[in-house]
Amino acid sequence: MSNMAAVRKALIAAAVAAFAALLGRAFLQIKEISLSSREIPVKRLNCQHLKNIDYGAEDITILKDGLAFLSTGLKYPGLPSFSDEPGKMYVLDLLQPKMSPVELQIKGQLDLKSFNPHGISVYEDETDDSIYVFVVNHPEHKSQVEIFRFEEEDTLVHLKTITHSLLHSVNDIVAVGVEHFYATNDRYFQHEALQLLTFIFDLYWCEVVYYSPQEVRVVAGGFKSANGINISPDRQFIYVSDIMDHEIDIFKRNEEEQLAYVKSVAVGSLCDNIEVDHRTGDIWLGCHPNGLKLLKFDPEDPPGSEVIRIKNIHSERPILSLEYGDDGRQLMASTVAAPYEGKLLLGSVFHKALHCVL
Ligand SMILES: [Ca+2]
Ligand SMILES: [Ca+2]
Ligand SMILES: [Ca+2]
């Protein structure tokens, strides 16, 4: 064998070994991140499916007066969707005995054919009692934030579309003013293969962005994938679900709207959106107990659902409890759990929504 041939052979062997090592690492990382060997926890509640919601309700939030807003029909790369229709927004009055969500009529300039709503947040302006609904929208898989004003009983008036290079992969938002919000980016790269590499190499590159009409900037970083975001009842703290890191990260807001890291609470599940009980401050999480089942999506072995509550999150010993667990026969791929005075609304990526009695 010539020298050249020997060198070539050695290089090929090295490349194959490197590729095998990369594959091995990818396999182990995906197994670990997705909690693929985890059994689905089971905890029953008295629940019923909500009428009219058949294509998921990725995010739900409830006002103090019992009015719930739901975003439905999300299409997200790599995850199933059972409808070709555009997404829709719904409203549900929890004080009415009839648990029947009503589709919100959208007025204004927004293109409804490409409407693809994802995370939502509602801001109540106490100066004039206006209600502003903020919606992450992915027309053609881009990211932008829509601001609407809610008008009784079933209308959203579109006020503004916000786009910005820092708002590139937005998952969820929390509104802190009439045009002010924090947003999570759930990926660093748009390209799926590149994004997968950030998970394989354990890169914490995702960020939380603050938006106001005056300025837009990164206010917190170091997330593997920042998903749900919400605020404490006293509006002093911001909670972020680092879904691929299986923890909730807590930040203190300061005067300049910068976020100071306080601590993280491990949740042992892939938690998606965060809702906060406005009376108790308890954190309610809609989680994916086994991420691989969600990615693979097999109707015979469906992804399950899990709801975790955290009490006393700011204390030395927060108390975590399983509030709902299902193997996917009742609800697949839960993303949000919104409590309201003994009731609980559960939403999902692409399946249904439930109302439960606690
Ligand atoms: Ca939200
Ligand atoms: Ca983290
Ligand atoms: Ca989410």
Image (tube, rainbow, N blue to C red):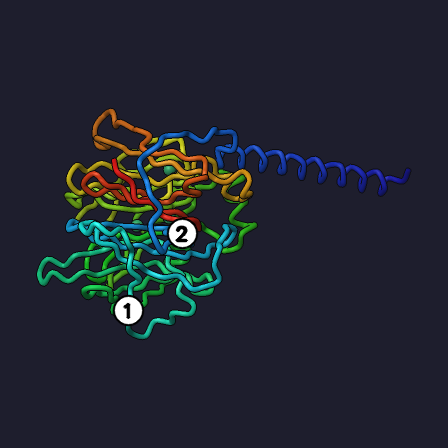
In-image side of 290 versus 52 (left or right):
right
Q: Nearer the viewer, mark 1 or mark 2?
A: 2
x, y percent for residue 279:
15, 40
Q: Residue at x 22, y 36 (%)?
A: 282
Q: Which residue is mark 1?
A: 160
x, y percent for residue 326:
41, 35
In-image side of 93 versus 243 (left or right):
left
Task: Identify residue type, mark 2.
Answer: Gly
Task: Identify residue type, mark 1.
Answer: Lys
In-image side of 352 versus 146 (left or right):
right
Name the N-terminal-most of marks 1 and 2. 2
Q: In terms of depth relative to the viewer, which is nearer, 289 or 268? A: 289
Q: Quadrant of residue 242?
A: top left
Question: Distance of mark 1 from mark 2, alpha carbons?
Answer: 25 Å
Q: Which residue is mark 2?
A: 56
Mark 1 crowd level (few <14, some 14–19, many ≥20, 10 Å Cα) = some
Q: Residue at x 40, y 49 (%)?
A: 352
Secondary structure under the numbered disc 1 in the rendered image: strand
Q: In terms of depth relative to the viewer, which is nearer, 102 or 116? A: 102
- In the orientation shown, which residue stands out farthest toward the bottom? 109
x, y percent for residue 277:
21, 41
Res 221 seen here: no
As drawn, 110 above or below 143: below
Circle number at residue 30: none
Q: Residue at x 52, y 44 (%)?
A: 295
**In the rendered structure, are the residues bearing label 1 and label 2 in contact, judged by CB atoms less than 8 Å apart?**
no
Secondary structure under the numbered disc 2 in the rendered image: loop
